Image (tube, helix red, strand yellow):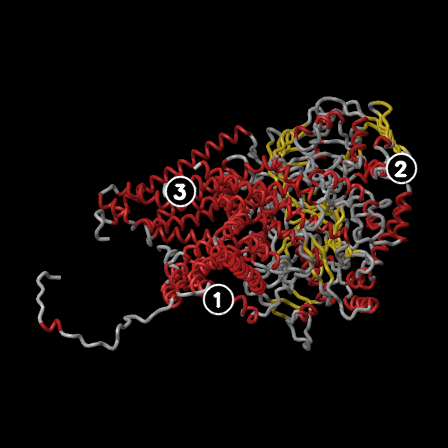
């Protein structure tokens, strides 16, 4: 700006009236449009959003695509990790063996009678001199070394010279050892060991029952079949892990999403009421909320779980939901009350009131929309903690009842076999982690997008 | 930030240096804190720090307990862990040697007749404070157990003593008990009815002595802590940190102390977590570890020497026989029995070596006349027959006048094995018979409550022996037995039990029990599952560990350390 | 200040009363009989047991007896450990949980502040990326998986050195406490790191920092006196709730590492329906948390002059 002002007559001319009073340089954006644009700009939040959508698809559409019954037990494929050889041979049904043909074998010493396969292994041996108190039979999956660790004792003392092993046979190599016991029941120094490779077999009836061969086909013994596919392996009862994860997702996500939704709604109603009415009512209502907050959360979750005392066949999802709602609403109500209190003092509320707006209008038009961002963010952050709670309770055996799967209870089952079959723990644990992560990041993104005051700095 | 005087990177550098200093200070602070805490802890001395699994120099072995014993009052003890501890620090009139034979304990000699038992106490038997164990200590313990105010759950095991049952019901004063002490070292027991196995009974913990003056001095806290307990067994408890550890030292007042070769048994950890137990063993911290199915491959990989053992418990699915229950129908029960495959259950589902598939109520260890009972009288085998089962089911449906089958409830506990098993049976009954089963998983006390009130169709139950006689299993299904929670009520069976109780002729008794066994199969009273077993590993240097079906198990009183076995 | 403290304490007491009442109510709605045992007992014995524990009286009377006992600090005798008082159980096992919790809080607090400051300082550079990745892992992996992995790594560690570097479980010495507390504090540490980072970033551009820089104060001084100190204030506020989370979160860690803490007792007591132990521990925990939060609030008032206590 300069100091010398020179006016000419043209400056004092009447300006022609313009038609357009003002033009907007940018299109008008509603609060939600603005938020959406911000969210889209946040790559992490957007990826999280896609993950959440994928999880929902996994839960809702997944079972349609992978229509394996999660409760069907495939006892031929127990605790199977993903990607093993599924070829098997058809055999006759198992008949308990009573030691026949044990004597007729041509080989001396420890020998296998008949065909050894994943159904049964039949052992026979010649009497060992000095074995007064019978024999002890071991099975190992490793060759026997000088330390003479023969492996699993299948039987501690047996009088006869034959034994049939049925225990949890897998298609693999086994080393069977027979040791004689002296008159004190102490093992004799010498032992006989035999190595067996077991092929995987299945009986015709089982194969037909599982739909592996057509009902009208006339299979022959010895025909090859391919066992059912389990892309993520199976659990300790041979149930398909992928199907169980999908069905478990229903429980975990149902609790994880519905419980927060319910308690946030209750909290909003309660908080809005307290904040809007104010005064003594507000004080009493908030004092009560403080009481509920003070209840130790997990202790009461467990107490409630026991209190509801599930009946037969009940999964316990609803009681868990109720317990969670009873204990969790006050936090939201406090937050919403605070928001309402501050909004109530805003100028535009006063203006609106002056223009004759009724209370319901004020609440619906101003208060709720203005707290919507906070509510949505709270909701998103409540989801991971609800999922954790479910997982934790199921983990300590206080969650949903079997056979209903949930990610938490699957972790509980899987953690015991963490060392041998890690996939049973790994998959549900990864899903829990991904879900929690996605909702957390989405919450961050939403907070940045929706609420300028709560915006975090990244 | 062009207006900042210091440039950004040098700011970051010096701030980073500052942060590093703080980091180092923090680490040092923690180190100091740790050191202080360590010093503090060593002052308090409640550490579970140990020397290793076995220590030959000090004669110490280190072990874990699955659970904290609730208390160690022998008159109240019911659980296995208490039984184990009490069995190491107390001794009854008689005891079991390492082969399981009954030998003299506090009693030096004894005679048991049809109506009377006389025990002569040895002079050398002493309490840990040096005073002699007298006949009065037994009388006091037994009277206290039977006193209704004590409410001892195991009082029933004393019912063979004259007037015991009446006292326990509150119909007679405790002093009316048929026991007397003509002198300090003679105990005379009058029997209510003849009993063939009284010698086995008196080695049970409920029969152990309690000294009256000491008990009164503890002011109701007897057995709650190491110092509120007086010992007369091979060991004394030198420290008991609740929930953490329990340490036993050899009892120098024990009459047989020279035969006890371990100086210290340190139960340094209390945990029921199978992984934790395994890790303790792997880490060389404990000399014994029980094996969960999932631990076995670790054991194989580490080349440990595994052992197994049947603990005498028999597990089965019990039906609810109360009127107006569907499971009261014999054809339904038979149908379920015909598809019950205990071999598949054990070999494919529980998968634990040591578990034995069974078809009987009676476990294999029980003696018959000359041999084991089960070898003399094998239970009738019921082969799997799905077609027959379906026919029985159809018969049942017609008898009950049902349109279609409503779901049956299967009550179970909330442990992992029970989960597996109940889900397995649910799937078997559905696949083979088309029956819907609803699993009713309950915590321990709620399951008991439901069992007692009869709120179930089937329940996964088990029974462990209280003494080594067929009767402890045989009388389970007597109509008056409160443990018969399915309320099976068969006059014929009851008559057999009564006869077996009264008989002193083992040949006759064995026949009676064989007939009970037949009835249980014919009447499809239960679906037998398995005899429970356990696989375990021990430190190779630890020798002489004894496993017992009844009494302290595992029993380390005869154990020793052999250094050369390393 | 005094009036405020008094008021908070009275409010705290009323809250404890509410917790006690809620626990009592929940306990008496639980189905099942705490006095049933594995061996079925006769009706007479059942009645005697009921009388011993006062369960034969009307519920209202039981409630007042219970309140009276709590007021005297007496939680009664355990149902399962028949000769042991609940007070003894709490006295023996709470210090264990508390020690572990305290260590965990210290780990979490110190770690959170330091890592948070570090990430903010090296924003969007390698340390930031690595730490934030770990933080995200820490937030999203469930505690029981963490605990199991923690124990597994101890076993591997000991196997690697061929000696017991750190024990895999148990309690007593500092070496027992180290890993369990770390595992327990991990989640909170991750949370605090995030909090610290964003609160640091907010402060970096604050006017007073700019002023300090303009004045030419040494960088180290600006960083520690102005940035770090102000940024860590929000961390203190969440410590109260964090203590609650950590003390109850100790369950799993206590189970996995065989630590004789109160949380493990609580889970056991629930399984056994041990009324007195359940009520005792719940009320005790509740009261502890209530007064912890009050204490944190008061301390916060002392640290931050902007907060007026009234």
User: x%, y% of residue C235?
Assistant: 41, 45
Residue closer to the observer: B518 or C91: C91
Left or right for A65, reference B533: left
The answer for how far apart the CA atoms under marks 2 and 1 are is: 74 Å
Q: Are marks 2 and 3 on the same chain?
A: no
Chain identity of mark 3: C
The answer for how far apart the CA atoms under marks 3 and 1 are is: 48 Å
Residue receiving disc 1: A54
Q: Is residue B541 visible?
A: no
Q: Is the C-beta separation of discs 3 and 1 under 8 Å? A: no
Q: Looking at the image, which residue is at 32% across and 45% down?
A: C227
Q: Residues within 10 Å of mark 2 (few under 14, many from 20)?
A: some
Classify C55 as above or below A390.
above
Q: Name the front one of labels 2 and 3.
A: 3
Residue closer to the observer: C183 or A95: C183
Please tell me whether mark 3 sits on a helix, a strand or a loop.
loop
Residue receiving disc 3: C308
């Amino acid at each position: 700006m300069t100091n010398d002002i020179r006016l000419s007559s043209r400056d004092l001319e009447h300006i022609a009236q313009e038609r357009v009073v003002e033009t907007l340089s940018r299109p008008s954006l509603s609060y939600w449009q603005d938020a959406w644009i911000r969210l889209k700009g946040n790559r992490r939040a957007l990826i999280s959003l896609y993950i959440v959508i994928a999880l929902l698809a996994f839960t809702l559409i997944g079972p349609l695509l992978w229509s394996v019954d999660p409760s069907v037990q495939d006892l031929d494929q127990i605790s199977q990790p993903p990607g093993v050889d599924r070829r098997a041979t058809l055999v006759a049904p198992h008949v308990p063996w009573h030691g026949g043909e044990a004597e007729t074998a041509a080989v001396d010493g420890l020998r296998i009678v008949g065909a050894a396969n994943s159904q049964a292994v039949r052992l026979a041996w010649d009497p060992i001199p000095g074995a007064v108190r019978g024999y002890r039979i071991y099975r190992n999956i490793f060759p026997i070394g000088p330390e003479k660790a023969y492996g699993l004792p299948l039987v501690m003392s047996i009088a006869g010279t034959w034994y049939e092993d049925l225990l949890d046979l897998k298609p693999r190599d086994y080393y069977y050892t027979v040791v004689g016991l002296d008159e004190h029941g102490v093992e004799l120094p010498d032992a006989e060991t035999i190595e067996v490779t077991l092929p995987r077999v299945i009986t015709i009836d089982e194969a037909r029952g599982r739909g592996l061969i057509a009902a009208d086909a006339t299979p022959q013994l010895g025909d090859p079949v391919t066992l059912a596919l389990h892309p993520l392996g199976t659990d300790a009862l041979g149930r398909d892990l992928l199907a169980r994860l999908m069905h478990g997702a229903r429980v975990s996500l149902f609790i994880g999403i519905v419980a927060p939704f319910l308690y946030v709604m209750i909290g909003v109603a309660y908080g809005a009421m307290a904040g809007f009415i104010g005064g003594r009512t507000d004080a009493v209502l908030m004092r009560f909320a403080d009481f509920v907050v003070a209840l130790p959360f997990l202790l009461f979750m467990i107490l409630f779980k026991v209190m509801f005392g599930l009946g037969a066949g009940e999964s316990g999802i609803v009681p868990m939901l109720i317990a969670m709602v009873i204990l969790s609403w006050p936090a939201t109500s406090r937050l919403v009350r605070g928001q309402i209190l501050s909004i109530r003092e805003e100028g535009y509320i006063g203006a609106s009131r002056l223009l004759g707006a009724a209370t319901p209008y004020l609440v619906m038009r101003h208060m709720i929309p203005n707290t919507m961002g906070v509510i949505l963010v709270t909701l998103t952050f409540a989801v991971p903690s609800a999922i954790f709670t479910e997982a934790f309770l199921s983990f300590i055996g206080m969650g949903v009842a079997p056979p209903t799967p949930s990610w938490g209870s699957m972790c509980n089952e899987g953690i015991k076999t963490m060392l041998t079959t890690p996939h049973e723990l790994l998959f549900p644990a990864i899903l829990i982690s991904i879900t929690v992560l996605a909702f957390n990041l989405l919450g961050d993104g939403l907070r940045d997008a929706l609420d300028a005051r709560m915006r975090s700095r990244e | 930030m062009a207006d900042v005087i210091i440039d950004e990177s040098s700011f970051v550098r010096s701030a980073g240096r500052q942060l590093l200093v703080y980091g180092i200070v923090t680490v040092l602070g923690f180190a100091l804190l740790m050191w202080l805490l360590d010093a503090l802890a060593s002052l308090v001395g409640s550490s579970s720090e140990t020397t290793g699994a076995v220590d030959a120099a000090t004669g110490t072995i280190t072990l874990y307990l699955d659970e904290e014993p609730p208390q160690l009052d022998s008159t109240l003890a019911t659980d296995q862990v208490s039984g184990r501890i009490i069995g190491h620090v107390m001794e009854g009139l008689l005891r079991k040697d390492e082969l399981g034979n009954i030998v003299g304990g506090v009693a030096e000699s004894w005679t048991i007749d049809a109506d009377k038992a006389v025990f002569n106490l040895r002079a050398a038997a002493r309490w840990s404070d040096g005073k002699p164990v007298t006949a009065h200590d037994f009388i006091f313990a037994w009277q206290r157990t039977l006193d209704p105010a004590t409410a001892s759950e195991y009082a029933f095991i004393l019912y063979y003593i004259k007037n015991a049952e009446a006292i326990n019901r509150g119909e007679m004063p405790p002093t009316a008990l048929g026991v007397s002490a003509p002198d300090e070292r003679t105990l005379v027991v009058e029997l209510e009815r003849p009993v063939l196995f009284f010698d086995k009974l008196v080695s049970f913990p409920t029969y152990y002595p309690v000294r009256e003056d000491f008990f009164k001095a503890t002011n109701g806290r007897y057995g709650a802590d190491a110092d509120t307990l007086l010992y007369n067994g091979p060991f004394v408890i030198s420290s008991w940190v609740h929930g953490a550890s329990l340490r036993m030292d050899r009892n120098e007042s024990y009459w047989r102390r020279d035969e006890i070769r371990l100086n210290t048994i340190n139960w340094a950890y209390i945990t029921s977590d199978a992984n934790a137990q395994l890790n303790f063993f792997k880490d060389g911290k404990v000399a014994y570890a029980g094996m969960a199915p999932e631990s076995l491959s670790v054991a194989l990989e580490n080349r440990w020497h595994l052992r197994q053992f049947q603990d005498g418990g028999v597990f089965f699915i019990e039906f609810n026989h109360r009127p107006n229950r569907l499971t009261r129908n014999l054809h339904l029960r038979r149908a379920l029995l015909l598809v019950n495959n205990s071999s598949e259950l054990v070999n494919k589902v529980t998968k634990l070596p040591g578990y034995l598939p069974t078809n009987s109520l009676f476990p294999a260890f029980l003696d018959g006349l000359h041999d084991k009972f089960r070898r003399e009288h094998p239970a009738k085998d019921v082969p799997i027959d799905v077609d027959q089962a379906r026919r029985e089911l159809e018969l049942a449906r017609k008898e009950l006048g049902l349109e279609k089958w409503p779901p049956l409830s299967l009550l179970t506990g909330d442990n992992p094995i029970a989960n597996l098993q109940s889900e397995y049976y649910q799937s078997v009954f559905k696949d083979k018979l088309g029956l819907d089963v609803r699993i009713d998983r309950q915590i321990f006390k709620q399951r008991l409550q439901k069992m007692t009130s009869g709120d179930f169709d089937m329940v996964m139950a088990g029974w462990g022996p209280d003494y080594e006689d067929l009767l402890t299993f045989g009388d389970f299904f007597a109509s008056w037995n409160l443990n018969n929670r399915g309320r099976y009520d068969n006059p014929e069976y009851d008559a057999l039990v009564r006869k077996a109780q009264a008989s002193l002729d083992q040949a006759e008794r064995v026949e009676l029990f064989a007939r009970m066994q037949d009835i249980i199969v014919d009447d499809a009273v239960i679906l037998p599952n398995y005899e429970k077993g356990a696989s375990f590993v021990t430190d190779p240097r630890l020798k002489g560990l004894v496993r017992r079906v009844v009494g302290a198990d595992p029993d380390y009183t005869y154990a020793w350390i052999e250094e050369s076995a390393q | 200040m005094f009036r405020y403290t008094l008021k908070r304490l009275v409010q705290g007491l009323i809250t404890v009363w509410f917790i006690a009442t809620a626990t009592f109510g929940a306990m008496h709605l639980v189905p099942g009989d705490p006095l049933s045992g594995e061996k079925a007992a006769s009706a007479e014995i059942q009645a005697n047991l009921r009388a011993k524990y006062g369960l034969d009286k009307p519920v209202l009377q039981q409630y007042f007896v219970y309140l009276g006992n709590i007021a005297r600090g007496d939680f009664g005798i355990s149902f399962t450990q028949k000769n042991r008082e609940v007070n003894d159980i709490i006295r023996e096992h709470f210090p264990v949980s508390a020690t572990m919790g305290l260590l965990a809080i210290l780990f979490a607090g110190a770690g959170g502040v330091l890592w948070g400051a570090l990430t903010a300082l090296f924003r969007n550079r390698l340390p930031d990326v690595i730490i934030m990745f770990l933080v995200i892992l820490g937030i999203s992996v469930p505690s029981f998986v963490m605990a199991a992995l923690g124990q597994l790594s101890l076993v591997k560690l000991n196997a690697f050195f061929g000696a017991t570097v750190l024990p895999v479980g148990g309690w007593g010495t500092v070496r027992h406490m180290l890993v369990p507390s770390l595992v327990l504090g991990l989640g909170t540490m991750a949370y605090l790191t995030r909090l610290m980072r964003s609160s640091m970033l907010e402060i970096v551009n604050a006017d007073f920092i700019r002023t300090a820089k303009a004045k030419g104060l040494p960088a180290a001084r600006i960083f520690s006196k102005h940035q770090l100190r102000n940024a860590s204030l929000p961390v203190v506020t969440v410590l109260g709730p964090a203590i609650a989370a950590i003390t109850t979160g100790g369950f799993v860690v206590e189970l996995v590492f065989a630590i004789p803490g109160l949380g493990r007792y609580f889970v056991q007591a629930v399984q056994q329906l041990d009324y007195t132990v359940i009520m005792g521990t719940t009320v005790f925990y509740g009261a502890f948390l209530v007064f912890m939060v009050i204490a944190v609030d008061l301390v916060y008032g002392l640290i931050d002059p902007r907060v007026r206590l009234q």
